[in-house]
Amino acid sequence: MNNKVIAVDGPAGAGKSTVAKKLSEIINFTYIDSGSMFRAITLKVIKEGIEIDDIDRIIYYANNSSIDFINNNIYLDGVNVSNEIRDSLVNAKVSHIAKIPKIREAIVIIQRRIARNKNVVVDGRDIGTTVFPHAFIKFYLTASVEERAKRRYNELVNKTQYSFEEVKNQILSRDYIDSHREASPLKQAEDAILIDTTGKNIDEVITELLYHISMNGGI
Ligand code: DC
């Protein structure tokens, strides 16, 4: 297996998806946004009106849904849901869905299938620890909670919907659930390179990642 995996893990709002996507474009790798898969299943659960604790039905619906990536857009049952999965209702529920081991197993299989014959940059919570433990290089991105909440708050289209404090609390709650669940919790892999993105712009972070990649023998 000569194809390379670059793992980018970290908590919500650390800048993973923006950085991982841009990095993938620069080095011409395929980008896999693993969080978007958990989000797509969460959207389906919301649309079908399934209760968050009805695990059997959630698993049934997840197993009977199709998730595809076309040109960096995510399709759920043939419909482009790239925007809808960023909805705050999905934000509030996704960590509960991502706790379910059978859902995680299904999503691990999809990620490994996509990466089988390709060079990929994958962002998520458990990429370096569980999904691709032998990744070519692993990064763990983080930032202060104030800065992560500020980034998420600035992304909100309708700023009257939530206050800054509410956005911050939502981030803290997701961090807690993601890092305390039993199945592959969010944690830095022992061999991951820690990058604190507080106060740094995207280009500064990308430059740091490219430096580490070149120190690792380049691609
Ligand atoms: O990166 P994101 O905010 O789009 O991720 C949404 C949620 O999905 C996150 O709160 C936890 C979960 N997730 C996960 O458990 N494992 C991953 N590899 C990616 C995301």
Image (cartoon, rainbow, N blue to C red):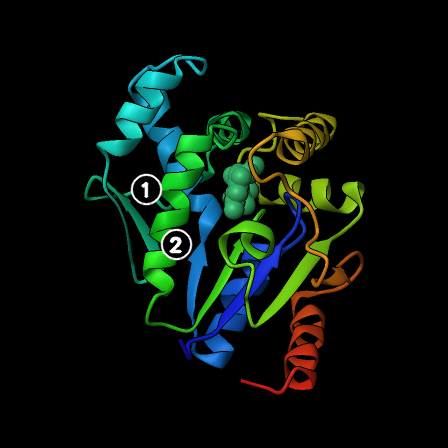
Q: Residue at x 76, y 51 (%)?
A: 143
Whether 154 is drawn above or below 63: the answer is: below
Q: Amino acid at mark 1?
A: Val
Circle 1 packing at 10 Å, graded few (<14), some (14-19), many (20+), is some
Whether 1 is drawn above or below 175: the answer is: below
Residue 81 occupies quadrant: top left
Foreground mark, 1 or 2, reads 2
Q: Residue at x 54, y 50 (%)?
A: 130
What residue is disc 2 on?
Answer: 111
Q: Is residue 192 left or right of residue 156?
A: right
User: Going from the N terminus, do you reach mark 1 or mark 2 first?
Assistant: 1
Q: Residue at x 47, y 28 (%)?
A: 100
Whether 126 is drawn above or below 193: the answer is: above
Q: Are marks 1 and 2 in contact (CB under 8 Å)?
A: no
Q: Tag 2's secondary structure? A: helix
x then y, percent, for residue 137:
61, 70
x then y, percent, for residue 209:
66, 73
Q: Mark 1 and mark 2: span between their CA atoms?
A: 18 Å
Note whether residue 138 is visible.
yes
Q: Residue at x 72, y 72 (%)?
A: 204
What residue is disc 1 on?
Answer: 81
Q: Amino acid at mark 2?
A: Gln
Image quadrant for the N terminus? bottom left
Check mark 2 vs ligand 1: CB closer than 8 Å? yes or no: no
Note whether residue 83 is visible.
no
Q: Tag 1's secondary structure? A: loop
Residue 214 occupies quadrant: bottom right
Q: Is residue 60 left or right of residue 152?
A: left
Q: Is residue 157 left or right of residue 203?
A: left
